[in-house]
Amino acid sequence: MISADSASDSSSTPHLRASLETFPPYVPGKPPRRVEGLTPFKLSSNENYLEPLPAVIDAMVAHAKDPALYPDDAASALRTELAQRLGVGIDELVVTTGASELLVALTQITSDATTEAIYPWPSFEMYPQTTGLAGAKRIEVPVTSEGRHDLDAMAAAITEKTSLIILCSPNNPTGPALRDDEVREFLQAVPSHILVALDEAYWEFATAEGVVRGLDLVADHPNVVLLRTFSKAHGLAGLRIGYAVAHEPVIQGLLKAVIPFGVTDLSQAAALESLRHWDEVLDRARNIAGVRDSFAQALRDQGWDVPEAQANFVWLPLVELSSAFEDACVEQAVAVRNLGAGVRISIGEQEALDRVLSAAADFRAQHFG
């Protein structure tokens, strides 16, 4: 048993990397608070609120047999059908434990203390974490007042030390999607030896005209790697499964950095079955997008400044009022995500969204007259 004296003795504390002090840990979305008489709702983690596809549940049950055996490390069946679906070679795909593992692997194969990584901010909270752990200098380029990537500023930030650039479309948490023409123009300014990661975790929800086409970018640019996930539109966040598409040399590099046997047989089976219901998954994503658009418009009608919303959430850039707004939603038994610069609200059940709208109207009257 560790004694209190030894635990408090700084001389006995193991030395950890100094870079750990330069960024905060990843903090997951809070669960909702229990309020008497109200059903609690969690709108803080961008989870798919729809029930899983019945065929996916059946596939999971059928494969929940023998956990004593390792899964197929190559995820051969899933990669084969995924390659056919996407129109790429099987050697241009790697399957991992969510897109989060891909971010870790990407920084491991591109970055160290001599390099620099560029990404928009605010954006996904794991970008500073993974690049910081690699020891890279982090170049956080502020998004525009509309919550969009400032691609001109990102291009201007490139130096001879840049080894990794991360783009996020639609951007989490602000919501806008990149357009194909602007990304292609941006890539013309990126030296070909710099790896550009396009994080498309929410691509299925994007409905705007001309959104970036990640698969086409990979085909045209050997230094682009596409990150996608089964967590969001497919509703498999709890199974941790994602994938990357890139030219074979990049995939071979990633294979050296990902966890062996990381993706379970159960996860592979569920993802494979969901892939076979591709059109249904996309239809469900479009339905969620329709709810999102109605919710965003309702907030705008109240007078809120809501950026373009192209994922399964909306963003309120509340800055110093973010914590107070989060508290107002907590009083309604709804958990939203306070990220300091603003509040991100995942699309969920209509009752939950109605409560947020009610809280937002009261909050606006209280703080803005």
Image: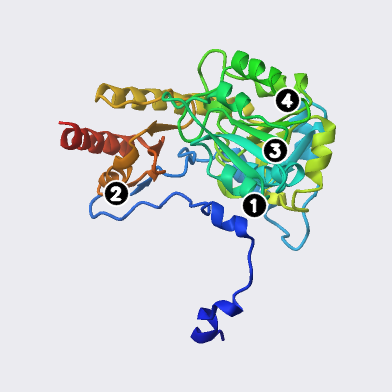
Residue 68 lies, in percent from the top left, at: 75, 63
Secondary structure under tag 1 reads: helix
Question: Which of labels 2 and 1 is toward the front?
Answer: 1
Mark 3 → mark 1, Cα distance in angstroms: 22 Å
- The label on residue 133 is 1
Q: Which residue is denoted by mark 4 in the rendering?
A: 86
- The label on residue 307 is none
Amino acid type of the residue tagged 1 in the rendering = Leu
Task: Say above or below: 103 vs 210.
Answer: below
The reply to whether the C-beta atoms of the residues labelled 3 and 4 are less than 8 Å apart is no
Amino acid type of the residue tagged 3 in the rendering = Tyr
The quadrant where residue 246 appears: top right
Q: Which residue is denoted by mark 2 in the rendering?
A: 330
The reply to whether the C-beta atoms of the residues labelled 2 and 3 are less than 8 Å apart is no
Q: Residue at x 53, y 44 (%)?
A: 125
Amino acid type of the residue tagged 2 in the rendering = Val
Secondary structure under tag 4 reads: helix
Task: Specify whether 140 is left or right of 308.
Answer: right
Amino acid type of the residue tagged 4 in the rendering = Leu
Q: Dot 4: few (<14), some (14–19), or many (≥20) neighbours within 10 Å? A: few
Q: Dot 3: few (<14), some (14–19), or many (≥20) neighbours within 10 Å? A: many
Task: Say above or below: 327 vs 360.
Answer: below
Secondary structure under tag 2 reads: helix
Rendered-image quadrant of the N terminus: bottom right
Question: Which of labels 3 and 4 is toward the front?
Answer: 3
